[in-house]
Amino acid sequence: MDGELVLQRLNDFENGALGFLAGAIEAVATQPLTYWKNAAQQGLVFTLNPRLLYRGTTVSAINDGTLTAFQFSASGWFQKLFAGGVVRELSPLETLASAFLGGCASGVPCCVLELCMIQQQRWGGSLLSTPLRLMRATGGSPVVLSRGFVPTAAREGFFCAGYLGVAPLIDRKLDDVDALRGASPLARNFVASTASGLAAAALTHPADTVKSCMQGDVERATYGTLRQTAAELYRKGGVGAFFKGYAARAAMIACCFIIFNEAKVGLAPVLFADKVPRNEADDSDKR
């Protein structure tokens, strides 16, 4: 079975479970890159201290697991909607649209969880105490937990379109490349996911920088609204300010895309063998 069709084969809960595992695995693997990216964006000192690098790993794993669960489930739902109730290869537009819409939907939980992760990385605290502290600091209102939602939703829409949309489309075209014809599934995934990951990183990094600055400064001492934050960043460093931490994030996203797509094809036959037989998945990846 084509790896792109996995989400159409599974129901929403199964897609969510598959996505959660993929996201949690990726979060632990890329946690140092996540820290370095956030530190660079906020102007913090570079460190190799593992106690700092892995601070917030639990909430990061929950965040990425929950986020990817939403994206797998929502994108699968849109894929089935566009496919009209049958399992079929989608058009490029359908593939990109289903992934983008699924990514935007994941912006709700992602915004809250990443806000807590960034605050933990800066000030410490537990998974429960961090949101409570933020609400107490703003008069008890839960509205503070939505800080940075707009850039988060935009970022996740294009991010998801990268690994569930662009990467599969690139993989379809690899048979036209003589050097990659007959390559292993892992090699094909590496090429497709790395190319789409680097492109997605460049496209989404400005939104991610604005989001990180807003969520790292909930007191609004330096960064206020979305427009004010963008203006302040431009005032401080011009266009380049929006790409702080790009190298770490580009590497992180390329790793994310590789892990997500490997997990989608590799874990699905293990968890849901009745719907995704391993031999079918393997055969299609060699197409």
Image (tube, rainbow, N blue to C red):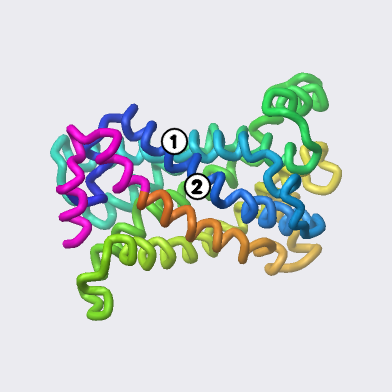
Residue positioned 37% across, 39% down in the render: 72
Closer to the camera in the image, 228 or 171: 171
Q: Position of residue 224 (x, y in %)?
A: 77, 44
Taking the image as shown, residue 21 lies to the left or right of residue 9, namely right
Residue, disc 2:
26
Q: Position of residue 168 (x, y in %)?
A: 30, 57
Residue, disc 1:
20
Which range of residues does the magenta coloring cover?
A: 263-287
- Label 1 residue SS: helix
280 part of magenta stretch: yes
Taking the image as shown, residue 208 lies to the left or right of residue 254, namely right
Residue positioned 29% across, 40% down in the render: 268
Look at the image and tell me in which quarter the C terminus lies. bottom left
Q: Amino acid at mark 1?
A: Phe
Mainly helix, strand or loop, the magenta region?
A: helix
168 part of magenta stretch: no
Q: Position of residue 119 (x, y in %)?
A: 74, 38
Q: Earlier in the sequence, mark 2 or mark 1?
A: 1
Q: How many labels, in total?
A: 2
Farthest residue in the top direction? 140
Q: CA distance from mark 2 to mark 1?
A: 10 Å
Farthest residue in the right direction? 221
Residue 125, placed above or below residue 151: above
Residue positioned 33% across, 66% down in the render: 187
